[in-house]
Each structure stands twice: as structure tokens, then as C-alpha cells.
Amino acid sequence: MSIDRDTFENTSEEELADLSVPEQVLGFLAANDERAFKAREIASQIGVDEGAVSTALSRLKDRDVVEHKATYWAVTDDTGRLERYSGYERATALFNDQLGAEEKESWREHAPSDPHPSAENER
């Protein structure tokens, strides 16, 4: 995965330590926890070979941190299980260091006041 020159120059070696493919996959799925993706979509988004992503997904499924249905993959909604997985902790820490921790209030400021139409279909 490439980074811009400014990030290269202003980020420490420790912060730039490569995440493993499973950590990248899990980080991507956790960041997009409201959606499920095909392996090729994940590979395209994180810039990793689809075969490596498929292998990582299978291993993450064995650890019960991702779920699989048909050709789609999603992060588990069991936050306790995720928190116990050390790769998740490392990926989250590196993303927070590089991008800043999320602030719920900032999200709420930009959240729509009406529910998404798909939420009405679930009622």
C-alpha cells in the first residue's frame, strides 16, 4: 500500500511498520462495519493481492473475528471477541496514531437527522 510523501517524511518508522495482511483486512472491515464485502473488493481497497486477502479472511474466520455468507465477508459484531484479538488492537492503535482517534461527537454533528431509508425497511 502506498503513502504520500508528506506522510513518509513526517511519520516515524514505528508508525509506518507494516500491518500484516490479516491486520489490514480486519482494519478495513472494522472501519466499514456496517457493510459486507467480497474478497476482491477488499483486495482492491487495501491494495493487496486477492489470494492473500482470501487466505487472511479464512484465518480471521477461524479466529471468529469475521463472518462469511455466500461470497461476502464482514467483521463480527461481537466487540468482546474483536477486542481480544491482538491484531485488531495493533491495527486500531496504528490507525489512531496515523489518523487520530474517532470522536463520537464529531460524527453526531454530521449525522443526518432522519434515519436511512433502509432502517425503515427493518421495522
Image: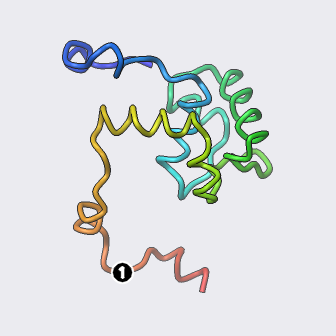
- Left or right: residue 59 versus residue 53 is right
Instruction: Pinpoint residue 39: horizontal percent, then vertical percent.
Output: 67, 35
Query: Of residues 6 and 89, which is closer to you in this image?
Result: 89
Query: Of residues 8 and 114, which is closer to you in this image?
Result: 8
Q: Amino acid at mark 1?
A: Asp
Instruction: Pinpoint residue 116: horizontal percent, then vertical percent.
Output: 44, 74
- Left or right: residue 92 versus residue 62 is left
Which residue is at 31% across, 34% downward? 97
On screen, 30 above or below 1?
below
On screen, 6 above or below 81?
above
On screen, 75 above or below 27?
below
Instruction: Pinpoint residue 44: horizontal percent, then vertical percent.
Output: 54, 29
Few, some or many residues within 10 Å of mark 1 (<14, 14–19, 20+): few
Where is mark 1, residue-wise?
114
- Left or right: residue 62 versus residue 35 is right
Image quadrant occupied by the N terminus: top left
